[in-house]
Image: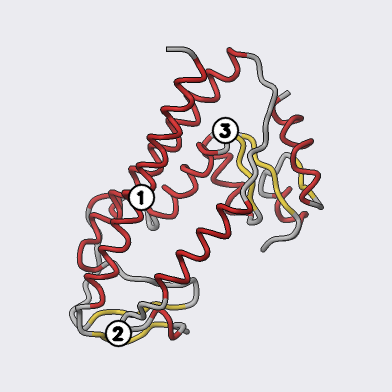
Amino acid sequence: MNLSTAERWVRRAGGLGASLFILMVYQGLYQASRQAAGRTVGQTPVLVRQPFSWRLLPISAASFGVLYALWRPIRLPLPAPARAIALALGGAFYLAGLGLMAWGRWQLGDMYNLSTSTGAQLFAGHRLVTAGPFAWVRHPMYLGGILAEVGALHTVMIGDTSFDMVMAGAAGVDALGVAWGYHTPVELVAAGARAVAQRFDEVPALLEEAEA
């Protein structure tokens, strides 16, 4: 099997895995919609309160469609050995992250529901899940998502928060910051960003420098 074929199969496996995880999420939301609502914690937006609003499904589908339409691959002219290493490391990070996300979703079981950074809707019989990955990591699904992002970027992490930079450092990969997000460039550099792009068109050049 040549390298191009291997890359194609890894992309297909990654797409299939992501699709299966999305189905797990929707199945969990359907399950959540059939449970009695309990109290809310923090400032919980109406869309994530019980009973579950099925308006979220077309909204999320439209969001995925917009992201897909706007997505543009960044081609890096890497020699074959570097491509093979990037493929192996990227695939390992991506699949490990996706597996951690799926494990966290499965472990939550019927306690899975939507939440935000400001609040959550609890069920009437809500219980705290501390088994599985939750025994080791507070937010295993978030960590899994970051690992998958790192893998999808072929070992270069691009983010707009200091948390992205810290997680990239913990994973042993380069981190690039973007100045139009949540944290300031100073905070991103302090957290470990190799460089910070002030504009989107600066990203390809910074990626080439990171791969040099």
The Cα atoms of the two marked residues, 2 and 1, are separated by 25 Å
In depth, the one of 5 and 114 nearer the eye is 5
**Left-right relation of 94 to 150:** left
In depth, the one of 164 and 155 nearer the eye is 155
Secondary element at image label 2: loop
**Left-right relation of 200 to 80:** right
The coloring applied to the image is secondary structure
Secondary element at image label 1: helix
Name the N-terminal-most of marks 2 and 3. Answer: 2
* Figure quadrant of the N terminus: top left
2 vs 3, front mark = 2
**Left-right relation of 80 to 58:** right
Q: In the rendered structure, find residue 51 and report the number of the disc placed on it.
A: 2
Disc 3 marks which residue? 155
Contact, CB < 8 Å: mark 2 with mark 1?
no
Q: Residues within 10 Å of mark 2 (few under 14, many from 20)?
A: some
Q: Kindly identify the amino acid type of the residue bearing the numbered disc 2.
A: Pro
* Figure quadrant of the C terminus: top right
Name the N-terminal-most of marks 2 and 1. Answer: 2
Disc 1 marks which residue? 101
The Cα atoms of the two marked residues, 2 and 3, are separated by 40 Å
